Image (spheres, helix red, strand yellow):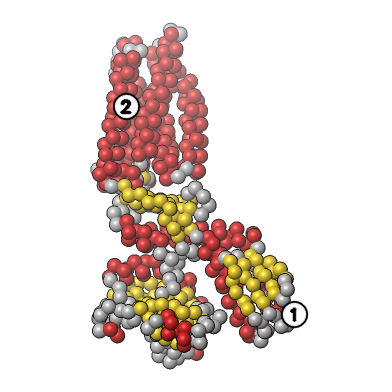
């Protein structure tokens, strides 16, 4: 055996050894997708109108504050739709327009009889809808990663406002939906009055009409105040505008309060800490409502200036405190979300899918190999070894790269077997043509491999381009198929050309009568 052949054999055995080491044992090293492992499949819709309404409400409140600071008189300022609000009874039109300059950049203004109608500009509305869906997708990804789900899928699906979420291995569906879909909008607002035992009592306290700069928010009475009993619902009158929100948070974590009950502590970023410090310094002795998703969790009295941290207490369990800190840490959703479709794939169904896929793969491989051995006889063993090495490399690369194996991925395995057989058939038939020209066996083998090389490259490059498009534009299962196909194609070039040729050279180097090597 010459030195050149020896290093080729060492290289092939090294690749096979590394591949087997990468994927064995498969149950621990190969990631299984939702259809094989079981888990949760959700299609969620972002309420983009709610995101537009938030922007409209914010602009309205800013305008209200600006008009109050400039002492501009008006009779009514209200939001009439997610993208529209009206201002009526303006006394000083010039002063009003000066205050509303910032609003005019987002809303177009239409004058009427003693009023202005502001409508959100179409390009701004489209941009906000797109940003809401993108931000929701990114927030869900962060939350799923915090949950510790292996190989989740979070992607846009179907309509522009829909998001596909697949969580392999998750069995607690309700908790997953709660964590993923919770808006988790944290607001810290100044308490004007309260708590009241009923909403009617709160309305009476403001003379039956809630001032435009205030709102009534419900909450639960502090557990400590009830002696550990069941908290009752109470109502607070709070300022509508929050000086700081969850968007100003730097981090949050589960902790315990002074009564050794589960709570959530949080810290602000630099800008939020500065604003919160000024706010608390100016309102010492007044109540501060900690509001999460429009519900008051606690309303402590501000005792001194608070700079950069706070705590949310309430009737939490330890799990609820952990989930709340998770959603606060990963950021609030820009808008509420609806669950349009929900499917749960049980692990039993996943095992059946694996069994069926493995059976199909083994069955297909067996039939193909029988055909090759019958048609090409001894030479067919070369193709058998080439295909087995190809599949070993494919499994090893998927395990090494952390790719997820799905049911369509198993279909990619079967297709890889077919591509491997096709490549070997091309090589064998080309060698037969070379032998027909009365060339020697070694010369026929070398010429066969050399002349079929570009044909194999052409077919594999075309297939790789198709796989790239499938991966780029396909959903999760289609991407799984494209991933398997891509790795299989690359491995097949190595096995069909390099491994197969090395085996021919190994046999030819040990035969004195080379004509007996090929039984084609």
Q: Which mark is residue 94?
A: 1
Is residue 418 visible in the rendered structure shown here?
yes
Measured along the vertical axis of the image, is residue 442 above or below residue 267? Answer: above
Q: Position of residue 416 (x, y in %)?
A: 38, 31
User: In the displayed structure, does residue 483 sit left or right of residue 47?
Assistant: left
Q: Secondary structure at mark 2?
A: helix
Q: Residue at x 35, y 78 (%)?
A: 233
Report how far apart the C-alphas of labels 2 and 1 lie in the structure. 81 Å
Frontmost residue, 286 versus 3: 286
Q: Residues within 10 Å of mark 1 (few under 14, many from 20)?
A: few
Q: Position of residue 467 (x, y in %)?
A: 47, 37
Is residue 31 visible in the rendered structure shown here?
no
Frontmost residue, 514 versus 301: 301
Residue designated by label 2 = 364
Measured along the vertical axis of the image, is residue 42 above or below residue 248? Answer: above
Frontmost residue, 85 versus 391: 85
Q: Position of residue 167 (x, y in %)?
A: 35, 52
Q: Residue at x 44, y 58 (%)?
A: 338
Q: Secondary structure at mark 1?
A: helix
Residue lying at the far bottom of the rendered structure: 285
Q: Residue at x 25, y 81 (%)?
A: 228
């Amino acid at each position: 055996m010459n030195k050149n052949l020896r290093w080729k054999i060492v290289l092939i055995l090294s690749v096979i050894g590394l591949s087997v080491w990468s994927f064995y044992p498969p149950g621990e090293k190969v990631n299984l997708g939702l259809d094989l492992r079981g888990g949760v499949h959700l299609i969620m819709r972002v309420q983009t109108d709610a995101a537009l309404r938030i922007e409209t409400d914010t602009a309205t409140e800013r305008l209200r504050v600006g008009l109050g600071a400039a002492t501009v008189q008006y009779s009514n300022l209200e939001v009439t739709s997610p993208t529209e609000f009206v201002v009526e009874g303006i006394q000083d039109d010039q002063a009003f327009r000066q205050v509303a300059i910032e609003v005019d950049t987002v809303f177009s203004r239409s004058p009427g009889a003693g009023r202005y109608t502001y409508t959100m500009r179409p390009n701004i509305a489209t941009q906000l809808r797109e940003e809401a869906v993108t931000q929701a997708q990114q927030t869900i990804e962060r939350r799923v990663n915090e949950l510790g789900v292996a190989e989740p899928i979070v992607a846009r699906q179907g309509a522009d406002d829909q998001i596909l979420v697949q969580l392999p291995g998750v069995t607690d569906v309700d908790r997953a939906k709660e964590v993923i879909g919770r808006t988790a909008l944290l607001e810290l607002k100044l308490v004007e009055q309260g708590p009241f035992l009923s909403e009617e009592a709160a309305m009476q306290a403001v003379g039956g009409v809630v001032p435009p700069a205030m709102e009534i928010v419900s909450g639960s009475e502090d557990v400590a105040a009830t002696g550990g009993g069941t908290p009752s619902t109470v109502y607070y009158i709070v300022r509508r505008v929050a000086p700081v929100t969850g968007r100003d948070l730097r981090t949050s974590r589960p902790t315990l309060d002074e009564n050794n009950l589960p709570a959530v502590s949080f810290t602000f970023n630099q800008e939020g800490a500065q604003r919160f410090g000024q706010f608390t310094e100016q309102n010492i002795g007044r109540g501060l409502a900690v509001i999460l998703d429009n519900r008051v969790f606690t309303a402590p009295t501000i005792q001194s200036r608070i700079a950069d941290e706070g705590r949310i207490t309430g009737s939490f369990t330890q799990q609820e405190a952990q989930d709340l800190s998770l959603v606060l840490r990963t950021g609030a959703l820009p808008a509420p979300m609806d669950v349009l479709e929900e499917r749960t794939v049980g692990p039993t169904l996943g095992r059946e899918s694996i069994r069926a896929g493995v059976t199909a793969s083994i069955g297909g491989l067996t039939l193909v190999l029988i055909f090759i051995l019958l048609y090409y006889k001894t030479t067919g063993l070369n193709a058998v070894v080439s295909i087995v090495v190809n599949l070993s490399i494919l499994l090893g690369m998927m395990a090494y790269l952390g790719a997820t194996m799905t049911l369509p991925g198993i279909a990619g395995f079967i297709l890889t077997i077919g591509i491997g057989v096709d490549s070997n058939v091309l090589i064998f038939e080309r060698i037969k043509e070379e032998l027909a020209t009365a060339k020697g066996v070694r010369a026929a083998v070398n010429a066969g491999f050399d002349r079929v090389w570009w044909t194999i490259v052409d077919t594999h490059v075309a297939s790789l381009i198709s796989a790239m498009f499938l991966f780029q534009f396909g959903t999760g299962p289609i991407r799984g198929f494209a991933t398997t196909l891509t790795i299989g194609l690359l491995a097949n070039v190595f096995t069909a050309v390099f491994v197969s040729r090395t085996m021919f050279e190994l046999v030819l180097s040990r035969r004195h009568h080379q004509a007996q090597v090929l039984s084609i």
